[in-house]
Amino acid sequence: ETGVTQTPRHLVMGMTNKKSLKCEQHLGHNAMYWYKQSAKKPLELMFVYNFKEQTENNSVPSRFSPECPNSSHLFLHLHTLQPEDSALYLCASSHAGQGGNQPQHFGDGTRLSIL
Amino acid sequence: SQQGEEDPQALSIQEGENATMNCSYKTSINNLQWYRQNSGRGLVHLILIRSNEREKHSGRLRVTLDTSKKSSSLLITASRAADTASYFCALLGGSQGNLIFGKGTKLSVKP
């Protein structure tokens, strides 16, 4: 149990569907992150939120839309995705500040498959 | 932006042997972190070593940092089958100082 819970664990969707990924942390952290992990590629940072404010959007296509209603919850809304978006999506949290100076705690991810 | 490069890409050893993984980087750092990822799971933070530290231990893990050579190593002593996982180093990078991960070393420990 890492203190970071992601749902669903697996998701299969068509390219025209709309779905959302959810992340919840119970560690009292103020920073939350979305990462994409594809086979044979390094982990890619997508979005960063500090104290509910988005502080990083790493050139992510607009078909991915994050939402952070409070410091404990993070969503990733998905719309008209492409087959290359199939990947493991990982959520992480940490104490706020420069993310590189803090250990990050990860959820177990959502395995997303786009048909 | 800054990214660590792990070496080797894959490592296969017998239970009880030691495993050593290396991470090289290009520019100066504040700290370097090591993470483990078991198959189908998220990453787990192992150790954070600061630029003014040379060595750090946690149980069977030993991390060294050589800033003059811009490299770090992770040593797992007396390995167990449960150590089978991918290991990543991560560095500060990007415009906002976020973590940038390498491609990882895939460790297989055979019983």
Image: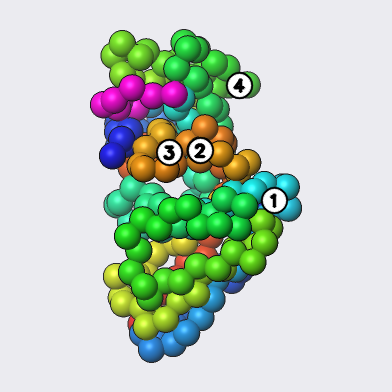
Query: Element under label 2?
Result: loop
- Which quarter of the figure is the C terminus of chain A placed in? bottom left
Residue A18 in magenta?
no
Q: Is residue A5 left or right of residue B37?
A: right
Which residue lies at the image location 56% right of the left edge and 39% below the top edge? A97
Q: Which residues are magenta?
A: B22-30
Q: Could you give the CA–CA distance between mark 4 and mark 1, rounded to whole angstroms?
A: 21 Å
Amino acid at dot 3: Gly
Instruction: Name the subunit of mark 2.
Output: A
Q: Position of residue A41 (x, y in %)?
A: 30, 51
User: Are labels 1 and 2 assigned to the same chain?
Assistant: yes
Location of residue A54 with respect to B30 vertically, above or below: below
* Res B87 seen here: no
To which quarter of the image does residue A96 belong?
top right
Asked if the residue under mark 3 is in contact with the one under mark 2, i.e. CB atoms within 8 Å, the reply is yes
**Residue under mark 4: which chain is it in?**
B
Q: Is residue B56 above or below residue A86?
A: above
* Camera-side residue of B105 and A101: A101
3D distance between C-alphas at marks 1 and 2 = 21 Å
Q: Which residue is mark 2?
A: A98
Task: Please name the residue shown 37% across and 37% down the image.
Answer: B93
The span from disc 2 to disc 3 (Cα, nearest Å) is 5 Å
The residue where tag 1 is placed is A3
Residue type of the residue flagged with mark 2: Gln
CA–CA distance between discs 1 and 3?
24 Å
Residue pointed to by mark 4: B58
- First reached walking from the N terminus: tag 1 or tag 2: 1
Taking the view exactly as shown, the residue that stands out farthest to the left is B26
